[in-house]
Amino acid sequence: MPSAADLAWLIPVLPLAGAVFIGLALIGFNQTINRLRKPVALTLISCVGASAVMSYAVLLEQLKGAPKVEHLFVWASAGSFTLPMGYVVDPLGAVMLALVTTIALLVMVYSHGYMAHDRGYVRFFTYLALFSSSMLGLIVSPNLLEIYVFWELVGMCSYLLVGFWYDREGAAHAAQKAFVVNRVGDFGLLLGILGLFWATGSFDFQGIAVGLSEAISSGSVPQWAALVLCILVFMGPMAKSAQFPLHVWLPDAMEGPTPISALIHAATMVAAGVFLVARLDPLYVQFPLVQLIIAVVGTVTCFLGASIALTQMDLKKGLAYSTVSQLGYMMLAMGCGAPVAGMFHLVTHAFFKAMLFLGSGSVIHAMEDVVGHEPVLAQDMRLMGGLRKRMPITSTTFLIGCIAISGIPPLAGFWSKDEILGKAFDAFPFLWIVGFLTAGMTAFYMFRLYFLTFEGSFRGEDKALQAQLLLSAEIVSDEQESHHQGSLHESPWSMTLPLVFLAVPSVLIGLLGTPWDSKFVSLLNPIEALEIAENFSWSGFLPLAVASVLISSFGIIIALMAYFYKRIDLVQLFVNKFPSVNSFLQNKWYLDQINDKIFVKGSRKLAREVLEVDAKVVDGVVNLTGLLTLGSGEGLKYFETGRAQFYALIVFGGVIALVALFGVFAPPSA
């Protein structure tokens, strides 16, 4: 009887089969399929559900100590060159398979309620299944080339899902921005993959690490070239996992439906970059300079995301910048040579951040019944408040998520974030200081989100404030008047059930990574687990843990005083004392403006100059050639008389001219 790992190829194939079947049916029988909403949803949810069951079986085998399973076949060959494809199952892949299928399944159930009245319901579910298949294929890929294929498929699905509401200008622009920024990183990744193959003759992860080490030792590849190749490959994860300066696409991607924010931009697609860096750890560990670059990029991203989140009033964008910050923590761990710690934070963060995004979707779903479907109104926290009494399930699960991400024990975020900070303290103390301060900022802005949204009095019926927000966004809309008849209410069970389910691992899953007996580390790296158990000391753990909890508690207390008790007018105080800093943060470090001036306007200026060259030089040469041809033809037509005597005269004249010419230029006789 085959093991679950032997059948793991079905995990990405099942959602793909469902997406292809429904997609083809949608093309051929559009109206009929769009009417069959529930059968379509049930079919695709069943496909992802079957993949989830198989993923759990694979994970269970790995927990029992099953060996790594790899099945390859020759996809292409030429002479001595062979290109294997297939799939691989190991502890890292098993954890990611279980994580992605769980989140995807819950998001699909949630989407049944959230997208119930959307015209593109069937298309949305088809895109979800196709994305799930692409991400699962990326996880089981055994080499860099196959990963790149699924990497691009994931990017394509992201473009389709972010721009799902393509008739909205904001969504269309966000999809284009995500596509272009990711192409920058993916181009670097492709160059790096090809360069590593040139240097090592392999696409296999371990083969590349060993081959590059041997090539450097033999002198066939200089050290600087190896460093460049490693950095080029890292550009792919920089874009996909929203690392500075290629992070700018992620906040704008919030224009897509909220379930997409939970699935792609909190738990799965953005995790692909972190996952790839973990896969390439045998390569990066050979180059301390590359690890330092990764750690610095992660730290800058971590601080940048948290600082911008401090001033955000859009609920989803506040969570988006929080995601950017947490991804920075994961990259910091990778740069510190602690990929297991980074992966542990990836897992814990996936659960509580997916819950937070789905909770924001539940809030927005309720707000739309009061203020209308304009995102400027439905997502602005200045129009919220007092939702805890109306939406008890959403508010409770959102509060759990805020506590978890703030790093308060015993919830999940404490154990994973504290592990990263501990590794950073040992490797790069200065980077630890930045990460430590960011932990306090995280606690502050997350509870700021919670208090503005769920506590106090409801502000959504303030017509003057609504008009002011629309005016500041330069939006003229009359349709919101027709939506003021609704009332705030809790979301349906299809939306609240995933929230309750995600709340459980958000509280408990961190206990699998306690530093004195980490089951997570034992699964991914048993040798490291033994070393941690032997070297663990309470005297080393408690000071850092207590400091981390204190800085987070300090952030929560400030948010409590400012936004719950309203003892401090923090906004006005900050604006008056530090107006330039406030403007800097509100304008997102001016990075969008810089990109617009240098790249957008710069490329347009270059295009205009190229157009001028094309019009004046290229077209000028073409037009001159045509003009010369026309003129010469016009002149020569008069020599076409049809008289033989005239033609003989021309021939005679030509001969005389040639004789005269040769006579002038002939060399003198000796």
Image (cartoon, rainbow, N blue to C red):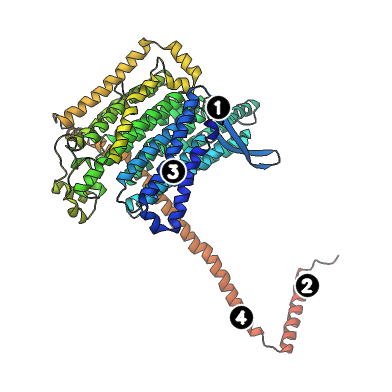
Dot in front, 2 or 4: 4
Q: Is residue 308 in view from this perspective?
A: no
Residue 312 to residue 627: above or below: above
Mark 2 to mark 3 CA distance (whole Å): 82 Å
Taking the spot 36% from the left edge, 50% from the top edge, the residue there is 37
What amino acid does circle 1 point to? Lys
Tell me where residue 304 sits by quadrant: top left
Residue 501 percent coordinates (x, y): 32, 32
Residue 663 disc label:
2
Mark 3 to mark 1 CA distance (whole Å): 26 Å
The secondary structure type at the circle numbered 1 is: loop
Mark 2 to mark 1 CA distance (whole Å): 90 Å
- Circle 1 residue: 68
Taking the spot 29% from the left edge, 20% from the top edge, the residue there is 549
The secondary structure type at the circle numbered 2 is: helix
Residue 140 percent coordinates (x, y): 52, 35
Residue 635 disc label:
4
